[in-house]
Image (cartoon, rainbow, N blue to C red):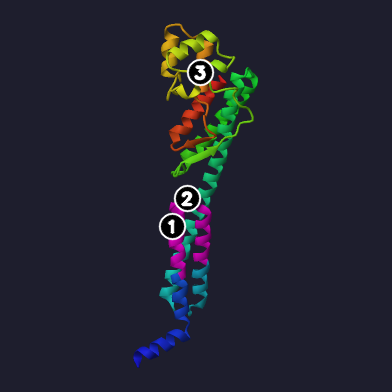
Amino acid sequence: TQSATSTKESETDGSVDIDTLRSEAETAVETAASARNNTNYAEAVDAYNEALTQYQAALKQLDTGATERRTEIQTAIESLRTDLEAIKARSEQRDNLIELLNAAEQSFQVAIVAYVQGSQTLARIRFRQARNGFEEASTILEEGDDLLTPPVEVSVQPDRELASTTLSALPVIPESETEALADAGVETLADLESSEETPWIPPTVETLANNGTVNAEVVTTLIFLSWWNTTDKYEFDTSSTVSRRRDQADYGFT
């Protein structure tokens, strides 16, 4: 009898509905946490807003004397609002980062092709734009928290293309140099191993440069070509990847 009476009173004061609303809110919070961990920030924001809606609806149904439950829900709401603002800020930072990296890598690749085609003024302009973009991206990474998880993959579609990926087919490289490179096993762009640090000279090219087989201008061209994407995609997985691109773009500009 006592249990039946309690249930009846519970239904009368609306606490059953409140429990349902709180359960739905908690489910939404779990969805938001999962979406956030998968960097699906739009879904996370929607789920957090749904949780807030459910908690606020529960709060409206509480009796004025339900102090303890009111405090619990209000605390949950404040925590959710904090999490929501944080995820919004992170989402905005990552969106901005992706946009910057896309534009910077696009300029970087155009600069390489322009240089090889003899358009050095355009190459300098594009290298400068790339350097500035990567610099701004590096600043965002310093201010943000793990914004490259998962890695940012940019899609690059330059408005200029190389005439060929075979070195001997590029007029900018003299025949004597392409023959020396071929003898060393470097015939296509895929054979050019990019150096990870200054002075950026691919190892095989450095050997040829040291024995005087290739001149300084050709070395510069080959450095740039070692950075050219053989696909239309490029991945930034660490802050050092971004800073390296910034330094490469600065080298190209200067």
Instruction: Tell me the SS state at disc 3.
Output: helix
Stretch in magenta: 24-52
The residue indicated by pointer 3 is: 222
Mark 1, Cα crowd under 10 Å, few <14 / some 14-19 / many 20+, is: many
Earlier residue among tags 3 and 1? 1
The residue indicated by pointer 2 is: 39
Instruction: Tell me the SS state at disc 1.
Output: helix
Earlier residue among tags 3 and 2? 2
The residue indicated by pointer 1 is: 33
Using the numbered discs, state the Cα–Cα distance from disc 1 to disc 2 in whole angstroms. Answer: 10 Å
In the rendered image, residue 29, in percent from the top left (x then y), is placed at 45, 62
Q: Is residue 37 magenta?
A: yes
Instruction: Tell me the SS state at disc 2.
Output: loop
The part of the image, by quadrant, that contains residue 252 is top right
Q: Is residue 37 above or below residue 70?
A: above
Furthest residue to the top?
A: 212
Using the numbered discs, state the Cα–Cα distance from disc 3 to disc 2 in whole angstroms. Answer: 38 Å
Asked if the residue at tag 1 contacts the one at tag 3, i.e. Cβ–Cβ closer than 8 Å, the answer is no
Residue drawn at point x = 64 percent, y = 30 percent = 159
Drawn side of residue 244 relative to residue 92, left or right: left
Q: Nearer the viewer, mark 3 or mark 2?
A: 3
Foreground residue among 123 and 90: 123
Foreground residue among 208 and 54: 208
Using the numbered discs, state the Cα–Cα distance from disc 3 to disc 1 in whole angstroms. Answer: 47 Å
In the rendered image, residue 44, in percent from the top left (x then y), is placed at 49, 57
Q: Mark 2 belongs to which amino acid?
A: Thr
In the rendered image, residue 211, in percent from the top left (x then y), is placed at 42, 6
Q: In terms of secondary structure, what is the magenta stretch mainly?
A: helix
Q: Mark 1 belongs to which amino acid?
A: Ala
